[in-house]
Amino acid sequence: MSSSSADVSAARFPKRVLGLDVGSKTIGMAVSDPLGITAQGLKTIRRQNKRRDLAQLEEVIRYYNVAEIVVGLPLRMSGAEGIQAEKMQHFAEELRKRFQLPVHLWDERLSSAQANRVLRDSDMSIKRRGEVVDQLAAVLILQAWMERRGFANENTKGVST
């Protein structure tokens, strides 16, 4: 994505929400539609190093005119936070500082299991399922967050009819 295409996209499209399923090797991504009703999966980032990972996220944020970010928070089944949850809190704070955007943490306890279940029930090959599981988990995280927010706020903020 060139910076000129990102500038055009930012001017043309309403602001969106980016959902992230962050793992040690990949970052699954999803973006909301312009009205904040549905989540669509984006290409998964293969993690390399912090600088490159954040640069790739910056491209996506610019291209889709992202206004908010939702990061999956991997809590234990009991609801307690562990080492991974602490890592995601630090990652969310880095995103806030770097991009100056609101970053929300969302309980993702069952998103990966649900993504695997959905993919297992499809006719997709095992190899292909492995390629899209992080993307689908990001979709599920973002969709759940938007639905929860929509029920609380009626999701009409900034929408013109």
Image (spheres, grey):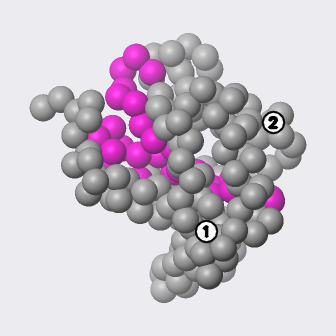
Q: In which quarter of the image is the N terminus?
A: top right
Quadrant (top left, top right, bottom left, bottom right) of the C terminus: top left
Side (left or right) of 13 relative to 88 = left
**Residue 9 vertical placement versus 46 (above, below):** above
Q: Does the magenta stretch include residue 128?
A: no
Q: Is residue 128 left or right of residue 11?
A: right
Q: What element carries label 1?
A: helix
Give the camera-side residue of 101 and 32.
101
Which numbered tag is attached to residue 52? 2
Q: In this view, does 85 lie to the left or right of 117?
A: right
In the image, what residue occupies the spot 22% across and 40% down? 156
**Rounded to the nearest whole Å, what is the CA distance between mark 2 and mark 1?**
22 Å
Q: Residues within 10 Å of mark 1 (few under 14, many from 20)?
A: many
Rendering coords of residue 83 (x, y %) = 80, 65
Give x and y (percent) for residue 54.
Answer: 74, 36
Spot the residue most to the left. Answer: 161
Which three-letter amino acid code belongs to the residue tagged 2? Arg
Residue identifier under label 1: 133
Residue range in magenta is: 10-39
| Sequence-wise first label, 2 or 1 | 2
Can residue 128 be seen here? The reply is no
- The residue at the point 83 percent across, 40 percent down is 50
User: Residue 134, position in %: x, y?
Assistant: 63, 63
Please report the residue visible at 62 percent of the width from the left and 20 percent of the height from the top: 2
Q: What residue type is labelled 1?
A: Val
| 42 relative to 83, above or below | above
Q: Which of 73 and 160 is in front in this view?
A: 73
Q: Position of residue 127 (x, y in %)?
A: 69, 74
Residue lying farthest to the right in this orientation: 49
